[in-house]
Image: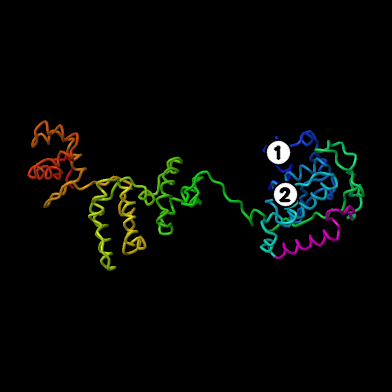
Amino acid sequence: MSAVLDVYDDGGNLLADFEDKLPESVKMASVPGSRDLERLPDDLFALVLVKSAEKHRKFPIDSPASTLLSGLYFVHTYRGLPPNAVKLGAKNLMSAMDLYGLEIPHQLSSLAKTGGLPDPESVTMLPEDSQAAANEVEALFKDRHLNKGSREKEDRSEGKQADLTGTDVMPVGQKPKKPKDVKKLSSVFNETPFEGPTVNDLVPLPRLVKHAALGGSGEVLFPLETFDDVMAANSAFDRVHEIPVTDRVKIAEALKERSADIGIPMSKTAAVYVGEYYRDPHDLVGALVRREEVLERLGKEGSYRSIMTRVRKSCGPRDYAEKLAELDRRYGLDELWDTSWLGNPWTDTLSAEKIASVVYTKGEITLTDEDLERLSTDRAVLSEILEEDIVNEFSKSPVSVFKSLPDPLKKTIGRLAMDKHWRGQDVK
């Protein structure tokens, strides 16, 4: 059995988590060693778990110190047991604590009733055989009078009795009360099958994460704690239609930061939603035209091009996308996002990579900012058509200087920039 249940499974490592809270009496007390443990009868364990015909004896109750330590472990490790075993172990620990005069923790009492499940009726989630075992345990507890207040224990087998009085273990808190009617602890019903779903299987603990993409109300949209989490969130954008449009930017922002922390590339699909650049100008205009066409088909009136042209002059790409989303909502087009009718404001606007902007178009000449920037590095070619002082300014700010030139000179520079030989490129 690999599960950590009692102190013998982890060598007491669990105690380090709350060492400061332990009474001095427990710190100084001795508990049975492995050899002594083997000599203890089954009766002096709160649980005997049966799995594949093998018995695993857990949570010794041979002394006040052992019982307190077993109870301490039990309330921290019970989630690794099936609910029926939790109820049985808790009841046996409570019985032993009562006999020793120890204070019974409230959580132990709760576990004896619920088996670790949030609601006693949740036991119906167990398989039929496990439920039958639970019923049998309840009946046996009643038959053997193990309920609180009873002090009579039926002897299950001869020779399996152990004195609980006169122990040299230091008392816990106060001196344990001497049982009035019982001097022996024997015939405790403690066998139960170690099979079926555990408490943790039935009621998993919520995963705690430090890094996550959160929704508007603080809920975790995607955990981003591990490498696998980040990869899964990136992959989710390949099925982006499964993610609500209104959540995509928020997820992409968190994913961008976490991907950088871990050192893995961000999905290109996700990166678009946090893109810092505009799409091609033709695409931007096309998206606005489509919206006006949809409005017309719906019998509505609205002007996108005039409004968004003004918006673009006053803000950056991401703000532009948000303004476009606001306009879509105003006209009721947000319900058509990501359909055959319409894209969505973010993918219609944003690019994760810088795209060349068209600066000049006339006839066969189409000139982009990248063309002008490339040409600005070739002073020898520029000096053939421009004055030296203009060449100097052109090298510093090619787009703004180009726009200030007369149209005939713009055509000349355009032809020059488009000529592969003059630009030092191979003709293909």
- Nearer the observer, 370 or 402: 402
Q: Which residues are magenta?
A: 128-153
Residue count near mark 2 (Cα–Cα under 10 Å), binned few <14, some 14–19, many ≥20:
few
Secondary structure found at label 1: helix
For residue 128, above or below residue 145: below
> Which percent across, then down, holds residue 104?
78, 47
| Image quadrant where residue 102 sits | top right
Q: Quadrant of residue 202?
A: bottom right
Question: Which amino acid does the dot numbered 1 rest on?
Answer: Leu
The amino acid at mark 2 is Gln
Q: Residue at x 73, y 57 (%)?
A: 84
Nearer the observer, 297 or 382: 297
Can you identify the residue that label 1 sits on? 15
Say if 272 sits above or below 337 in the image: above
- Residue 315 lies, in percent from the top left, at 29, 45
The residue singled out by tag 2 in the image is 107
Circle 1 packing at 10 Å, graded few (<14), some (14-19), many (20+), is: some
Cβ atoms under marks 1 and 2 closer than 8 Å? no
Using residue 304 as the reference point, say whether residue 147 is left or right of it: right
SS category of the residue bearing label 2: helix
Real-space Cα distance between discs 1 and 2? 18 Å
Task: List x then y, in percent, for residue 139.
Answer: 81, 62
Residue 327 point in image, percent of width and height: 31, 56
Pointer 1 or 2: first along the chain: 1
Front: mark 1 or 2: 2
